[in-house]
Image (tube, rainbow, N blue to C red):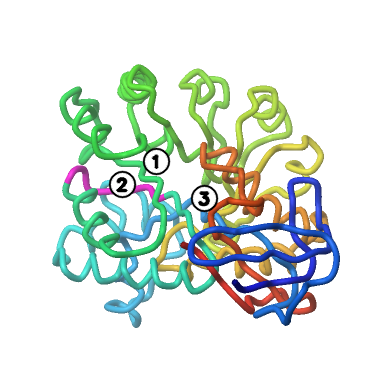
Amino acid sequence: MEFVSGEILTIDGFQKGYISFEENKIITKEKGTCPKKPVAKGLIIPTFVNAHTHIGDSFIKKKHAKLKLPRNIEKLVGPPNGLKHKLLSRTSNEEIVNGMIDSIHEMKKSGVSIFCDFREGGINGLNLLNLALKNQNISPIIFSRPNNLKYISKEINDLLNYSNGIGLSSISDWEYPEIVKIAKHVKKKNKMFGLHASERVREDIDIILDLKPDFLVHMIKATESDFIKVKENNMPVIICPRSNFFFGIQPNYKLMKKTDTTFLIGTDNAMLNNSSILDEIFFIKQKTNLFSMHELLHTSTYIARKALNQECGILGSNSKVDFVVLDKKTFKPLFILNK
């Protein structure tokens, strides 16, 4: 049996104590002094959730390292003619898979055990991700995407059979009736539906909410009224600050705080940044003092799990071994255990 000790992040905040564990189970969580020398001492938190990724473009970071990427959202990532999509279409499956494996390793080394990926490329895209996930100790939440910007019933059925739901780009990229059909199909199958919203331009929040998405991504150009409506619908917003920064924009932290909007944290396109949620948290702390470190750690562990329908009964006796020990001063990982 081994031990870690320090301050344990619970749903109600940090509590001093220690955890004993062996194999793949936490044996007990106790208050008080650790009975033997711990393998690590610091802040003990659940492993992180990376709430929004596109790891399919990971290969671009390595293969096209010298390529000057346009700092324009539509030119770089807008479907179907953004540079990212052009590079994906002419890159071998092996290179795409190897790039995804690199990003998965990055996440694991930084304490991420769950990631939510918007998977481009239809069924083939799902197959490539499954190849990358082979023998990897990480939990994916996969949002597939049609090959083209239109609704085809059989294609949506096939995608939903092999994914957790559908994740689309913004309504600005689509003919709205096509998205309506997809959203209704997804809900009928009791799967999740995610959507980028108001990233480069403000979009009509009312018609977005009519689609009944489970969450929205970005909301950079959203107004206070938009955030209020999102809050009234108990809908989380996923922010990706470092990716936004690449395009010269940033989340509206003040409006999210003012409206008490539930937000999750993701790293977005792997071609732009590493897949570490801790690095994303450090970046947020550089840009604003509106959120404490405790809030950001809680957001990227417990709140993210709840919002994405993942198990929240963690860091308790007889729960799965799934935690990170952080240095109390630097917040850098000292010990990561995920089984």
Of the numbered discs in the image, which one, if any, rests on residue 30? none
Q: Nearer the viewer, mark 3 or mark 2?
A: 3
Q: Earlier in the sequence, mark 3 or mark 1?
A: 3
Which type of secondary structure does the marked residue at label 3 adopt? strand
Q: Earlier in the sequence, mark 2 or mark 1?
A: 2
Q: Residues within 10 Å of mark 2 (few under 14, many from 20)?
A: many
Q: Which residue is mark 2?
A: 79
Residue appearing at x 78%, y 43% in the figure: 257
Q: Residues within 10 Å of mark 1 (few under 14, many from 20)?
A: some
Of the numbered discs in the image, which one, if any, rests on residue 51? 3
- Distance of label 3 from label 2 (alpha carbons): 21 Å
Q: Quadrant of residue 303?
A: top right
Residue appearing at x 26%, y 47% in the figure: 80
Pinpoint residue 112: horizontal percent, then vertical percent.
51, 62
Of the numbered discs in the image, which one, if any, rests on residue 169? 1
Image height of 173 relative to 248, above or below: above
Which amino acid is tagged 3? Ala
The span shown in magenta is 117-123
Check the picture and name the quadrant holding the N terminus.
Answer: bottom right
Q: Residues within 10 Å of mark 3 (few under 14, many from 20)?
A: many
